[in-house]
């Protein structure tokens, strides 16, 4: 396991300070606020620690309410909404400086057999043939070196590989609002920490990194990295369909059906390398063009 991955696991290992109350810290992000994927992942950890181990997360719905302060701890309070025969529901509120910054509702289910079908996996190149984030980002002379290093530092626990040029790599001309990335953790997870919730938590963490890229592609925008768009996540929903491992390659197939009113919508499917549909994701975010643009 890489040191970067171990640091991420430590970040997600919340401190319990009272029954159903947990505390987490933050790490550096590419923007001067707490990374949304981190808050969502930590909130899911808090919820999972109040649920019987035979019940697995199958969905989450979240709202980002305020920018998080990366220099202050985050307190997560869990409400035990319902414990049914098959489903368990939890609500989590993340608080900083006396104000809620994030709200999560999530549901867990015991395993059961049922109907089974899925959308087919789209074509994508072998991830091993694609450049790493470091190889791709350090080839962009138009990006300031500090921006590149912040990107790489924030993503060092994840091996994330773009299939095509990211929006900040080749911008100026609109493209199809569709983006693909392969991702996995930067190192294997040890056998004693491979509980299903951990893999779901790590996928939740990564899911907020690139989902709105397809919005930018549709308009030839490079995003905050080149200063032509200001953005932030508003809400986020995920459905976990089938088991997967976050330390094995996952294809994140993303598209944007709409942008309007200062908001953009991204939707995506995440597949295992052998073609199983593991997760569906939808996110809306603020996407504003600065006045000078």
Image (cartoon, grey):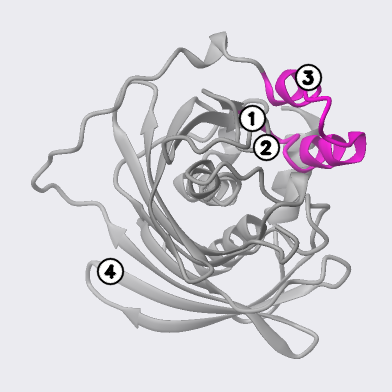
- Mark 2 or mark 3: which comes first in sequence? 3
Q: Residues within 10 Å of mark 1 (few under 14, many from 20)?
A: some
Q: State which quadrant residue 144 falls in.
A: top right
Name the residue tied to disc 4: 87
Name the residue tied to disc 3: 139
Rendered residue at 52%/16% (across/down): 127
Q: Is residue 51 visible?
A: no
Extreme top residue here? Answer: 129
Q: Nearer the viewer, residue 35 or 157?
A: 35
Q: Is residue 165 above or below residue 226?
A: above
Mark 3 vs mark 4, CA separation in Å:
48 Å
Per the image, label 4 sits on a secondary structure element best described as: strand
Rendered residue at 70%/46% (across/down): 9
Per the image, label 2 sits on a secondary structure element best described as: loop
Is label 2 in contact with label 1 (beta carbons under 8 Å)?
no
Q: State which quadrant residue 183 falls in.
A: top right
| Whole-percent x, y for residue 285 in the image | 53, 63
What count of labels does the image hold? 4
Q: Quadrant of the C terminus?
A: bottom right
Mark 4 vs mark 2, CA separation in Å:
42 Å
Q: Nearer the viewer, residue 2 or 128?
A: 128
- Mark 4 or mark 2: which comes first in sequence? 4
Q: Quadrant of the N terminus?
A: top right
Mark nearer the viewer, 4 or 2: 2
Name the residue tied to disc 1: 170
| Whole-percent x, y for residue 58 in the image | 34, 57
Q: Which mark is residue 168?
A: 2
- Mark 1 or mark 4: which comes first in sequence? 4
Q: Which residues are magenta?
A: 132-160
Is 151 contained in the magenta span?
A: yes
Q: Please state if 281 lies on the left or on the right of 208 as rendered.
A: left
Per the image, label 1 sits on a secondary structure element best described as: loop
């Amino acid at each position: 396991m890489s040191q970067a991955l171990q640091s991420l696991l430590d970040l997600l290992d919340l401190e319990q300070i009272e029954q159903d109350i947990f505390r987490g810290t933050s790490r550096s992000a590419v923007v001067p606020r707490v990374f949304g994927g981190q808050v969502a992942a930590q909130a899911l950890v808090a919820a999972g620690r109040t649920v019987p181990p035979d019940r697995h997360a199958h969905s989450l719905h979240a709202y980002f309410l305020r920018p998080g302060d990366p220099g202050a701890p985050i307190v997560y309070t869990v409400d035990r909404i319902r414990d049914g025969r098959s489903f368990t529901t939890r609500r989590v509120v993340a608080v900083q400086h006396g104000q809620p910054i994030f709200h999560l509702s999530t549901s867990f289910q015991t395993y059961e057999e049922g109907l089974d079908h899925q959308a087919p996996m789209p074509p994508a190149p072998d991830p091993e043939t694609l450049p790493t984030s470091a190889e791709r980002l350090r080839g962009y002379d138009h990006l300031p070196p500090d921006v590149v290093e912040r990107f790489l530092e924030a993503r060092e626990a994840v091996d994330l590989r773009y299939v095509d040029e990211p929006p900040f790599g080749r911008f100026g001309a609109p493209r199809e609002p569709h983006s693909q990335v392969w991702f996995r953790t930067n190192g294997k997870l040890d056998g004693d920490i491979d509980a299903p919730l951990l893999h779901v938590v790590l996928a939740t963490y990564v899911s907020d990194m690139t989902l709105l890229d397809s919005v930018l592609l549709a308009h030839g925008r490079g995003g905050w990295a080149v200063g032509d768009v200001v953005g932030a996540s508003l809400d986020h929903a995920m459905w976990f369909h089938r088991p997967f491992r976050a330390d094995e390659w996952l294809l994140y197939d993303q598209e944007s059906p709409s942008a309007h009113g200062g908001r953009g919508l991204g939707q995506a499917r995440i597949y295992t390398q052998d073609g199983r549909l593991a997760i569906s994701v939808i996110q809306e975010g603020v996407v504003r063009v600065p006045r000078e643009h």
